[in-house]
Image (cartoon, rainbow, N blue to C red):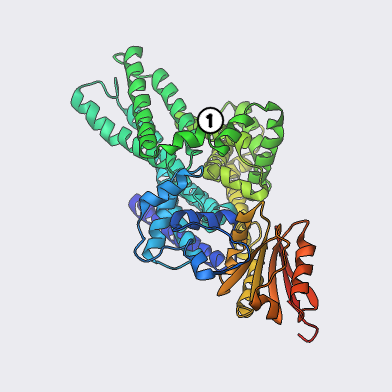
Amino acid sequence: MGQDSSKTLFKTIGYILLILQLIICIVVGIRKQGFHEDEYYSYYSSNRTAGLFVTDRQWQDTDTIKDEFVVIPGQGFNYGLVSTVQSWDVHPPLYYDILHTACSIVPRLFSKWIGIVVNMIAFVISWLLLSKLMDILRVSDITKLLVLAIWGFNPMTVSFVMFTRMYMWMNVFVIGCALLHIMLLRAARAVENTILLSDSKSMLVFWLRYMLPVMVCSYLGFLTHYYYLIFFVFMGMCFTIWLLFRRSGRGNRFSKRLIEAVIYVCSCAVSLGLAVVTYPSAAAHIFAGYRGTEAISEFQDIANFPSRLLFYTGLMNNGVFAGSFVIVAVLLLVGFIVLKIRVSSEYMMLVITGVAYFMVVAKTGLLLGDTSNRYEMPVYWLFVLVIITALELLLGELAARIETGKLFSLSIKEKIDMISRGVLYVFCAFLILWGLGCDISGSNILFLYQEEGAKVQYARDNKDDCVIVMYNSATPDKVWWITNEIFEYPKVYFVSEENDAAIEDEVICSASKIIVYIADDDNQQNMLNMLMDANEKLSKIQEVAHEENWTTYELTGFGE
């Protein structure tokens, strides 16, 4: 088979692989039955109109509530409002602009599929960028397919396609940042004496071709998530150091390399400056917002760094590598040191940036159990790429040394290359099959909330009954954690648990059955007793369901 035919075959297999991974995302998406509270916030802050609020002792039409999570006809593509809403919180607006665009295309629709499809688009872009990056790194076709299969079928990758937040899109710009810097490094290395200083024309052409895309990517990445800045800064530092101390022709003096580095750094600074000019709230979010100040204060407590690093390493070890990461990483490190294997500048940039990002985020990210994977997920692809390619390099080096050594028989030497490839393929097959098993079974897949299906069905079956939501006045925002269930009823009656005055609403006082969603509170039982006292028809309290912060009760008479 010719080289062109081989390339075409592997490309075809790659696209088939991508289609299969998208099918997996759809299958897993069908099983998603509920939402994380942050997902509700994504829809709300992308599409809000009058704003969410809870009343006390009043009925609310749920269509009015739903209007805050969907785009109302005539209010679509309102990006100014999206930016304004985000300025009140701690996030940049680009992801919300994307989600708002999708919601504007299908007004009045509240669906998990809007967020999933938006993330599937990000998944496809990430997949293509990662494939392109491996082409530039000259990763073999088989290894490239293995990396794409491991990453694309991985339960953490699929989990964040399910999660209607900005992390899948941040993944796009993180991979883009790595790809563009590797392209920039390769282009700089190809020039004998200087990158930008030959003449004004060549300088402009080089800048437009290689530097401008870096600026655009960084502008968009910063406006997607502020953690992108961490990756960008470390990648930029690595590239600047390489730029200053790279080996090149005699005519490229250090003074010229210094000017090139200054041009690079200034270009990056301009892109970030333009992002802040576009979205002035960014500076306040980072230095004065509650998440920014929390992150900054975390650096003052060095004592908790080991425990935090272990926590986040454990998440990646179990969620991405099926418990094998620590063992394999240690073996690779020892092997590279003992065999004195050297790696290219490109790989060193990726490894240093990935590890630095991981450690900084481990120090500053929130500790939220498995959902904390969100903060490190944008570099999981990098660890998969590095682990697999490093394992291939180490096994190849071992095979080469055994073939030239005297410790093994000729028969073993003849088979050693096949054995080393076999070890690599078995490990990759293990990760791929484990990932597929998780995808099919639903284990290790986050943000599905399959238990919510029964609760939503209960609400759907009882949509014509009287419904009361009793909320804790200290945390009224948690009412929206049960939005998926509330939407099934035409209207609900809101009650503050801190108001123990008798309820006199005629509908409630005459109902033969009342469904109560009540927040966890010390006054919970008193409020239920008050309801029973207000309605003589009620004589029985039955717990229907319980979830974080909320319990559902059914109040009926003995004959019901």
Q: Position of residue 346 (x, y in %)?
A: 45, 32
Q: Residue at 56% across / 31% down in the picture? A: 356
Q: Position of residue 168 (x, y in %)?
A: 49, 50
Q: Is residue 325 above or below residue 288?
A: below
**Picture quadrant of residue 71:** bottom left
Image position of 196 (left or right of 179): left
Q: Residue at 25% across / 20% down in the picture? A: 197
Q: Position of residue 60 (x, y in %)?
A: 55, 68
Residue 439 visible (yes or no):
yes
Choose between 23 and 37: the one closer to the eye.
37
Image position of 534 (left or right of 158): right
Q: Is residue 461 above or below residue 335?
A: below
Residue 163 visible (yes or no):
no
Q: Is residue 237 above or below residue 135?
A: above
**Picture quadrant of residue 280:** top left
Image position of 559 (left or right of 342): right
For label 1, the crowd category at 10 Å Cα-Cα, with few meaning under 14, some 14 to 19 and many 20 or more, is some
Choose between 217 and 437: the one closer to the eye.
217
Q: Quadrant of the C terminus?
A: bottom right
Q: Which residue is mark 1?
A: 352
Question: Of helix, strand and loop, which one carries label 1?
Answer: helix
Choose between 497 and 122: the one closer to the eye.
497
Q: Position of residue 11 (x, y in %)?
A: 39, 55
